[in-house]
Amino acid sequence: MTYFAQQLVNGVALGAVFALLALGVTLIWGVLDVLNFSHAQFMTWGTFGTAFGISRGLPVIVAVVIGMATGALLAVVVEELVITPLKRRAAVDAASIVVATIGVALLLETAIKSLTHSELRGFQSSGFPSGSISVAGVSIGQLPLAILVTSLLVMAALGLWLGYTRRGRELRTVASSREIAELLGINSRTSYVIAFAVSGALAALAGTFVGAQTAVVSYSSGDGLLLITFAAVVVGGMGSVPGAVLGGMILGVGQVLTAAYVSDSVANVLAFLLMVLVLLVRPSGLLRRQAVSRA
């Protein structure tokens, strides 16, 4: 029972990381109907931003803010230079935009690969919580616990922002109908920029958590997680904010428990098995899309 509780906490912590990544993808899909394949690069570049801040002796919190700002800035640049110009062209369809985001991802990965000489870089995690604490006789790692608590706080803050602030309500309105939003005097362009900035910041935060756990970061850090992120979005429901959280948690807990009690090989394909199962049984995902505009 103790071992199960430990693995459950680890699974929920991993699920929280998946949820942060899935939330970023969901925001972009909900607002612009764009499936963004460059999302993994927001994570990678943001993680390198955090690692840079830590290497310069900055406090961890400041370094994390730098990383999140890096991810947000990069996301906004991609939105301004690639996504928006393509969206303005009536002849460009959704598939073309997806292909463009794949091209952007390859370009950004090549750039960071060149800058780092294709080397694994150490991620100094000394400033993050370490060791373990005992809760009801169960030894729980302080780092996974800190990741879980921080992620939950960030997700709660995002939910409150979407539900109770003017910018959040405007973003939800644009997600529901851009035409109605513009009739109401809402600047959809501003909402696009905000959605990409938040998406990039969330990806960078998730990448920082992964880096703190693995103690390394590389140009390909986000590649494997991108597919799991898309699986979480599909499982939870395309465009659903609560669905992104639910999908991430299901995949995180499922992967850890499967690895602990079955095998690593099965755990590695679990996300895709669940995605296929959901597509066969409930193609819209566990939660419906209207949660984007009303969650």
Image: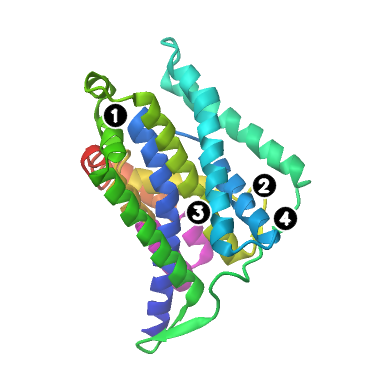
In this orientation, which residue lies closer to the viewer: 137 or 194?
Answer: 194
Distance CA(mark 2)–CA(mark 4)? 8 Å
- Please identify the quadrant where the C terminus is shown: top left
Q: Badges 2 and 3: C-beta atoms under 8 Å apart?
A: no
Describe the element under mark 3 as helix, strand or loop: helix
Q: Label 1: which residue?
A: 174
What residue sits 31% from the left and 37% below the top?
A: 167
Q: Badges 4 and 3: C-beta atoms under 8 Å apart?
A: no
Q: Is residue 34 left or right of residue 129?
A: left
The amino acid type of the residue labelled 3 equals Leu
Q: Is residue 268 magenta?
A: yes
Residue 95, above or below 171: above
Q: Is residue 70 left or right of residue 87?
A: right
Distance CA(mark 2)–CA(mark 3)? 16 Å
Q: Is residue 266 left or right of residue 57?
A: left
Quadrant location of residue 15? bottom left
Dominant secondary structure of the residues highlighted in magenta in the image: helix
The amino acid type of the residue labelled 1 equals Val
Q: Residue 161: where, in percent of width, then height?
A: 30, 47
N-term mark: 1 or 4: 4
In this orientation, which residue lies closer to the viewer: 37 or 24?
Answer: 24
Q: Tell me the magenta residue range.
A: 249-269
Within 10 angstroms of label 1, few (less than 14), some, or many (20 or more) residues? Answer: many
Q: Badges 1 and 3: C-beta atoms under 8 Å apart?
A: no
Q: Residue furthest bottom?
A: 137
The amino acid type of the residue labelled 4 equals Leu
Which numbered disc covers residue 205?
3
N-term mark: 2 or 3: 3
Q: Residue 267: where, in percent of width, then height?
A: 47, 61
Which numbered disc covers residue 120?
4
Q: Label 2: which residue?
A: 219
Which numbered disc covers residue 134?
none
